[in-house]
Every structure is written in C-alpha cells, then in structure tokens.
Amino acid sequence: MNKEEIARLLHDEYEKAAKEEGWRTQEYCRVEFDDLPDANKRVMLRIAGIIITKLQPTQVKDLTQEEEQK
C-alpha cells in the first residue's frame, strides 16, 4: 500500500469505527477522502507516512522514489 491508500483507509475506517461507537464526527469529516479539506488530507497523508516509516521501513525507499517522480 502507498501513503495515499493508507490515508484513505484510515479515513474510512475511522468514520466506520466512530459510527459504531456512537460518536458524532465533525460534519466536514463525514465526506469521502477526496472531498476533505486540504489540511485534513495533509494530516492523514502525514500519519500514513509515519505508519509506513515505523512499520515497514523497506517501503520508505519506494515511497521516496515515487514522490520524487511526481
């Protein structure tokens, strides 16, 4: 999984888990990942990057190369 896929997964699963626990999340967070405010997307992408770095160090090299190609 790449950073964006992880960020999307985290966003979707957070919303599901919050709903199951009876939480009311903020209105602007109850949207698809693509429709999130840019600041929210950046945070989710940053967290995804941290997860990759901490859990799968061998993928960091691949992500760095992928980002450099953009």
Image (cartoon, rainbow, N blue to C red):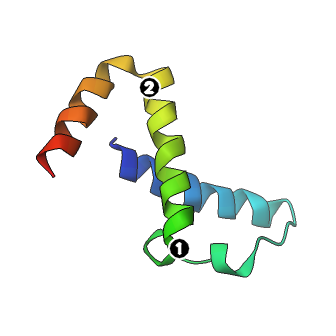
Instruction: Judge from the rendering whether residue 27 lies leftward or rightward of residue 13; answer left or right.
Output: right
Q: Which mark is residue 48?
A: none
Element under disc 2: helix
Does the rendering let one see residue 9?
Answer: no
Circle 2: is it few (<14), some (14-19), or many (20+) Cα within 10 Å? some
Q: The N terminus lies in which quarter of the figure? A: top left
Instruction: Judge from the rendering whether residue 68 lies leftward or rightward of residue 55; answer left or right.
Output: left
Please tell me which residue is depicted at 43% across the width and 73% down the height of the picture. Answer: 34
Element under disc 1: loop
Q: Which mark is residue 53?
A: 2
**Distance between mark 1 and mark 2 Cα atoms:** 24 Å
Identity, as a three-letter code, of the amino acid under mark 1: Leu
Please tell me which residue is depicted at 67% across the width and 64% down the height of the picture. Answer: 15
Instruction: Judge from the rendering whether residue 29 lies leftward or rightward of residue 51; answer left or right.
Output: right
Identity, as a three-letter code, of the amino acid under mark 2: Thr
Residue 4 point in image, percent of width and height: 38, 52
Residue 8 point in image, percent of width and height: 47, 58
Please tell me which residue is depicted at 54% across the width and 65% down the height of the picture. Answer: 39
Does the rendering let one see residue 15?
Answer: yes
Relative height, residue 27 to residue 14 (above, below): below
Relative height, residue 66 to residue 39 (above, below): above
Instruction: Judge from the rendering whether residue 13 lies leftward or rightward of residue 56; answer left or right.
Output: right
Residue 23 point in image, percent of width and height: 85, 66
Residue holding disc 1: 36
Please tell me which residue is depicted at 38% across the width and 45% down the height of the picture. Answer: 3
Quadrant position of residue 65: top left
Sequence-earlier tag: 1 or 2:
1
Relative height, residue 29 to residue 44 (above, below): below
